[in-house]
Amino acid sequence: MRLFPVIALDLTDRAREVKQVDRAWADAAISEAQAAGVDDALIVDQRGRLGESSSANVFIVRKDGTVATPPRGGIVAGVVRNWILEERYAKEELVFLQDLPKCREVFLSTAGRGIVPVASVGDLHFSNHSEAERLHRRWAELPRGLPS
């Protein structure tokens, strides 16, 4: 997955914290990212504060191995994100674009695809996907469906 930063994060818009049919803001961000030749938008605010992608939560892995995701506020807190936090694999922290060069890995979480490694954000490239792969395996091992 290749991402491009797009300024579209609105921390005051609580409606964005739930999935909606009207996703015009996300569609506009995707269009801007695709025009830059990448797969999806990394939604940020004017100061470079990370929010989410157009349809997934974002996580960073610092060089020391700690994992962080932006706090709720203007983003959907998805089920995979919640699982990662509940299992204490990550913690909520403010994350900014300027933090990314100091990271060894970036990944997304989404109910439809699980955990997806990010290959690049703009001109930054990430080739280490070990944490994303580890969490993806753990997520895939969980039982699915309703109890019988």
Image (cartoon, rainbow, N blue to C red):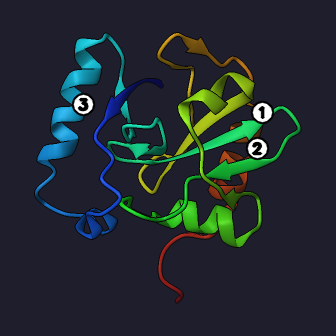
Which residue is denoted by mark 1 in the rendering? 130
Q: Quadrant of residue 45?
A: top left
| Mark 3–mark 2 distance (CA, rounded to whole Å) | 28 Å
Which amino acid type is shown beneath numbered disc 3? Ile
Extreme-bottom residue of the structure: 148
Local SS, label 3:
helix
Find residue 74 and report its horizontal and vertical position in percent. 35, 60
**Left or right position of 97 against 73:** right
Q: Is residue 17 left or right of residue 51?
A: left
Q: Residue furthest front?
A: 47
- Closer to the eye: label 3 or 2: 3
Name the amino acid type tagged 2.
Answer: Arg
Q: How many marks?
A: 3
Q: Is residue 45 above or below residue 39?
A: below
Kind of element beneath mark 2: helix
The answer to whether the residues at label 1 and label 2 have Cβ atoms under 8 Å apart is yes
Kind of residue sitting beneath label 1: Ser
Q: Earlier in the sequence, mark 3 or mark 1?
A: 3
Which residue: 56% across, 28% down? 118
Q: Is residue 15 above or below residue 107?
A: below
Q: Quadrant of residue 106?
A: top right
Residue identified by numbered label 2: 134
Residue at image coords 67%, 66%: 85
Which residue sits at x=74%, y=69%? 87
User: In this rendering, which labeled residue sits more in front, label 3 or label 1?
Assistant: 3
Using a 10 Å C-alpha cutoff, classify the residue at mark 1 as few (fewer than 14 neighbours), some (14 to 19) or many (20 or more). few
Q: Which residue is mark 3?
A: 30
Return the x and y of residue 39 as percentages of the image width and height.
Answer: 35, 23
